[in-house]
Image: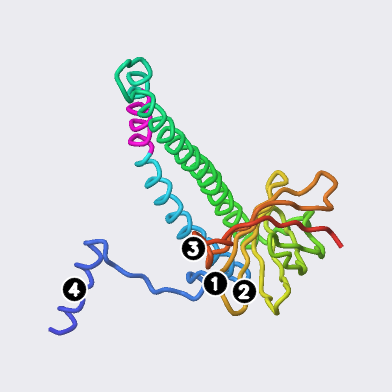
């Protein structure tokens, strides 16, 4: 009786589409290589940072309409005051001009921040796509060619004149390597090179992921110039600056 019940149960599972065939060792996908696993980690980090950048971009976008409305109101008030012959009109017009100047300066700063953030978002999206392409190339055994960033670069970070060196290796559009900077700072670098646009992430051995560097590779491939953003100091004085690199 027990065997009959077991057979009936097995038939019911097969009928319901729940029959589980034995899994062989060949059906289990092999674990990713250490290189692919590291790149997968980079993709996850980039996606997290992309979400943060998108959140900041949406927050800035919500301030755009109120700012434009404020400018419209100030200009309308200025038009009325300039045309007025009432006592004190000139003083009110001068005060409105000062308010307009401050509002326009703030608006231009926000617009420039939006443009920079939009460019960074597009760059992150491109970097994620390149990382995924690199992972696919590793899976298929393809060997990308060596790129223009490969080599040792003498680096200066301004405005502090901090000097050091980057040792980079580029495969396809992706770059990686190590760095040493004055003050005993050292660690690894991960980044991309797309249409001479350089993007590097600095991961310090003590501080962790600490800096992003953007720049452009010269047409002769010997120098890089651009801007850096320090995660630890972002929003405070000294959180950004310029950097340059010369091929050794």
Q: Is residue 1 left or right of residue 98?
A: left
Labels 2 & 1 near each other (Cβ < 8 A)? no
Labels 4 & 2 near each other (Cβ < 8 A)? no
Circle 3 crowding by C-alpha within 10 Å: few under 14, some 14–19, many from 20: few
Q: Was residue 68 drawn as part of the magenta stretch in this picture?
A: yes
Query: Disc 2 to disc 1, how far (Cα)?
Result: 31 Å
Element carrying mark 4: helix
- Disc 1 designates what residue? 30
Span of residues in magenta:
64-75
- Which mark lies nearer to you, 4 or 2? 2
Element carrying mark 2: strand
Labels 4 & 3 near each other (Cβ < 8 A)? no
Q: Was residue 65 drawn as part of the magenta stretch in this picture?
A: yes
Query: Disc 1 to disc 4, how far (Cα)?
Result: 34 Å
**Label whose residue precedes the other's in the sequence (1 or 4):** 4
Q: Which mark is residue 186?
A: none
The quarter of the image holding the C terminus is bottom right
- Which mark lies nearer to you, 2 or 1? 2
- Disc 4 designates what residue? 9
Query: Disc 4 to disc 3, how far (Cα)?
Result: 44 Å
**How far from the left and from the top, in percent, is residue 228?**
63, 57
**Label whose residue precedes the other's in the sequence (4 or 3):** 4
Depicted 87 relative to depicted 105: above or below: above
- Disc 2 designates what residue? 204
- Disc 3 designates what residue? 44
**Label whose residue precedes the other's in the sequence (3 or 2):** 3
- Which mark lies nearer to you, 1 or 4? 1
Main SS, magenta residues? helix
């Amino acid at each position: 009786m027990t065997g009959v019940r077991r057979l009936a149960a097995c038939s019911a599972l097969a009928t319901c589409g729940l029959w589980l065939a034995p899994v062989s060792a060949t059906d289990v996908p092999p674990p990713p290589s250490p290189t692919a696993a590291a790149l997968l980690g980079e993709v996850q980090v980039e996606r997290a940072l992309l979400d943060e950048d998108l959140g900041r971009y949406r927050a800035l976008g919500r301030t755009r309409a109120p700012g434009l409305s404020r400018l419209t109101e100030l200009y309308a008030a200025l038009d009325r005051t300039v045309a007025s012959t009432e006592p004190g009109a000139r003083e009110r017009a001068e005060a409105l001009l000062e308010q307009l100047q401050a509002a326009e300066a703030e608006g231009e700063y926000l617009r420039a921040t939006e443009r920079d953030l939009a460019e960074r978002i597009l760059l992150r999206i491109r970097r994620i796509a390149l990382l995924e392409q690199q992972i696919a190339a590793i899976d298929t055994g393809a060997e990308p060619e060596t790129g223009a960033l490969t080599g040792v670069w003498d680096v200066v970070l301004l405005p502090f004149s901090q000097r050091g060196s980057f040792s980079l290796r580029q495969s396809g559009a992706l770059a990686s390597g190590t760095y040493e900077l004055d003050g005993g700072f050292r660690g690894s670098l991960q980044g991309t090179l797309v249409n001479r646009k350089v993007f590097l992430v600095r991961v310090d051995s003590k501080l962790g992921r600490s800096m992003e560097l953007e720049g452009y590779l010269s047409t002769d491939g010997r120098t890089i110039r651009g801007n850096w953003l320090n995660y630890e100091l972002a929003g405070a004085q000294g959180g950004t600056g310029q950097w340059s690199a010369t091929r050794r």
